[in-house]
Image (spheres, grey):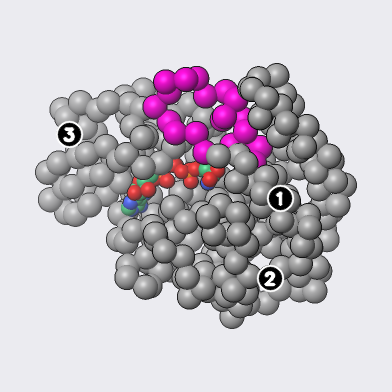
Amino acid sequence: MAVYTELDEEVLRDFLSLYAIGDLHSFVGIAEGVENSNFLLKTTQGRFILTLFEKRMNPQELPWFLGLMGHLAQHDIACPQPVMARDGRVLRQLAGKPAVIVSFLEGHAREEITPAACAQVGQALARLHKAGQSYEAERPNALGPQGWQSVFASCTDGGDEAVAALITETKEALAAAIKAWPEANDLPRGQIHADLFVDNVFFEGETLSGIIDFYFACTDFLAYDLAICVNAWCFKAEQDYQPDRAAALLQGYEQIRSLSDAERAALPVLCQGAALRFLLTRLYDWVHTPAGALVTRKDPWAYQRRLNHFQKVPHVP
Ligand SMILES: Nc1ncnc2c1ncn2[C@@H]1O[C@H](COP(=O)(O)OP(=O)(O)O)[C@@H](O)[C@H]1O
Ligand SMILES: N[C@@H](CCOP(=O)(O)O)C(=O)O
């Protein structure tokens, strides 16, 4: 569930009067999601998403994310577009939290993943990368190799025997991936989504209709974003690698943006890094989420299995 902050209807009506998006018909909290509180608003002018940013977000970084989403939307990427209030501001405060209203995207996350869906994800990712090239402000990836080390360090005293074993087994892989990681100038860089998982891509029928959740976006290797998608989209039952999906993902991507030889050669290590990144943040949540918390913890072992796959089979697809 992800509604951490309750909203009072009158307070919301007052808030909406700052925008030119019509009068409130109804609002409902959205159960999906983990990080922030999201509400579906229905107004006399249509549907919108209201997000209240919760404590894991650094409010100083919000203008970068909202600027990127606005930039991409203006470049025909189907993503939420931040809505300006009458005074021209997109970021305000509501119920004591930073708040934004964005456009509503039609569609739903897929339940069945096919190579054809992966091909469209690849195309959409490449379009996002191309459109992001003209968004100049940079945001370093806080969850790059340096970040992995500090997340790892903050997991090491907690958890049961299974967690202790996972920590031991991850230590060596972490050191190896950091050592093998490309230098900043080795590969093309730009704005990446960095969390393009199945729940963040909407389809209407068989057609990709939009991409949401840009709050891990950052400036990093473009091919690393592809490696994240290989991890997120190309395994079945959390462990069986599906090379046909990966082939379709890469082919779709290259229909829009060609990969260089260096990017292709780096994909296996980038896939290991992507597996580690999600293993580590899931492990952090596993160790630090108190029993009885509203949020369902995600399984870090699913990403250990992916990491093991890319260690044993160092080629993609
Ligand atoms: N622009 C949007 N249009 C339609 N639905 C959205 C939009 N943004 C978010 N949602 C809905 O809200 C849910 C949670 O959003 P998400 O950005 O993943 O939250 P979190 O960052 O908290 O994980 C999504 O699964 C989707 O159902
Ligand atoms: N995709 C990440 C978790 C981030 O959650 P989101 O709901 O913000 O996409 C993972 O699977 O570990």
What amino acid does circle 2 point to? Pro
Say if residue 143 shows up in the picture.
Answer: yes
Q: Which residue is mark 3?
A: 13
Q: Residue furthest right?
A: 179
Q: Position of residue 13 (x, y in %)?
A: 17, 34
Q: Residue furthest front?
A: 161
Q: Residue at x 43, y 31 (%)?
A: 295
Q: CA distance from mark 1 to mark 2?
A: 15 Å
First in sequence, mark 1 or 2: give its number: 1
Give the class, few, some or many, for how many residues have Cα within 10 Å of label 3's Cα (few <14, many ≥20): few
Quarter holding residue 258 = bottom right
Q: Which residue is mark 1?
A: 307
Give the class, few, some or many, for how many residues have Cα within 10 Å of label 1's Cα (few <14, many ≥20): many
Left or right of 131? Residue 84 is left
Q: Which residue is mark 2?
A: 317
Quarter holding residue 9 = top left
What amino acid does circle 3 point to? Arg
Query: Split into 4 quadrants, where in the image is the C terminus?
Result: bottom right
What amino acid does circle 1 point to? Leu
Q: Residue furthest bottom?
A: 255
Q: Mark 1 falls on what kind of element?
A: helix
